[in-house]
Amino acid sequence: MTGRARDSKRIIVCSVVAAFSILLLSCASPSSNNQPLNLNRHDTAAASPEPSTSATQTPIAGQPPASQASETPPPENEPAADTTLAGSYVGRLKLIIPVQGVRPDQLQDTFMEARTEGRVHDAIDIPAPAGTPVLAAADGEIAKLFQSERGGTTIYQYSDNKKLVFYYAHLQRYGDGLAPGKFVRQGEVIAYVGDTGNAGTGNYHLHFSISVIPNPTRYWEGTNINPYPLLRNSQ
């Protein structure tokens, strides 16, 4: 091959290489109609996702975690089903007036009368001379003999089925041989009328109440019912 021919071939190869290079540059260059190329694609791919609503949240002080159910306290003990009005006992609870010699027509309903410190009486007062015998209103066991600041010398007595408690207060003294656990019969002398406690000196009377108790071991807790309609129907 002559030297001229070799020079011509070299020029052609160089021209082809130059044209190819120009073509590559034009493809790589951004146009006015396209967004700039992102040469850091890995940054976008590795970006941290937004926290989702299902992600674990930091518990707020005072609130239990969502996965831990709040404890529900057990319900309170329900009162006995028969903690109702005194009327439901009329005709089926046979009582006697617990003060010897007092007639039904001499009784006064003092159940709702106001007392000191905003209290309601929740009982009946039966006036009688000092030393008048106090009688068991019904059969039942003596639950407690108690010296009370307000009631003075007092007696708590169960009914025979231990669903009721009879309370006698302001007593002068107890009957002979009376003690907790003793079973007394209706009409038995259990004490004597007095003015102890907050009755007031010379204000001799028996404070008598009846309560329905849900638990015999807690004889002092119950729902008071009005003794008046029950005693008025006594014989």
Image (cartoon, rainbow, N blue to C red):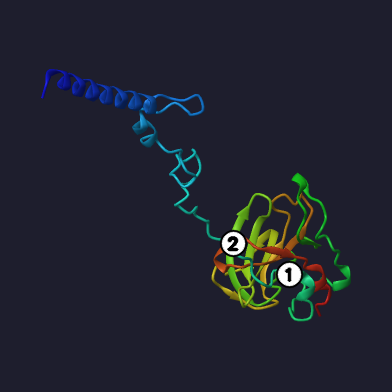
Mark 2, other Cα within 10 Å: few <14 / some 14–19 / many ≥20 = some
Q: Which amino acid, mark 1?
A: Thr
> Residue at the right extreme?
105
Give the quadrant of residue 1.
top left
Q: Select label 1 or label 2 by which is in front.
A: 1
Residue 110 against residue 7 in the figure, above or below:
below
Q: Position of residue 113 (x, y in %)?
A: 83, 55
| Residue highlighted by disc 2 | 145
Looking at this view, is 9 or 72 the one in front? Answer: 9
Looking at this view, is 132 or 36 the one in front? Answer: 36
Give the quadrant of residue 182.
bottom right
On the rendered structure, is 194 left or right of 45? right
Rendered residue at 34%/23% (across/down): 22
Mark 1, other Cα within 10 Å: few <14 / some 14–19 / many ≥20 = few
Q: Quadrant of the C terminus?
A: bottom right
Rendered residue at 68%/78% (across/down): 186
On the rendered structure, is 206 left or right of 56? right
Q: Is residue 18 visible?
A: yes
Looking at this view, is 51 or 153 the one in front? Answer: 51
Secondary structure at badge 1 equals loop
Q: Position of residue 24 (x, y in %)?
A: 33, 27
Q: Which amino acid, mark 2?
A: Leu
Q: Position of residue 129 (x, y in %)?
A: 79, 61
Rendered residue at 57%/68% (across/down): 216
| Residue highlighted by disc 1 | 84
Rendered residue at 54%/66% (across/down): 217
On the rendered structure, is 129 left or right of 78? right
Q: Position of residue 169 (x, y in %)?
A: 69, 59
Q: Is residue 179 visible?
A: no
Residue 139 against residue 165 in the figure, above or below:
below
Give the quadrant of residue 7.
top left
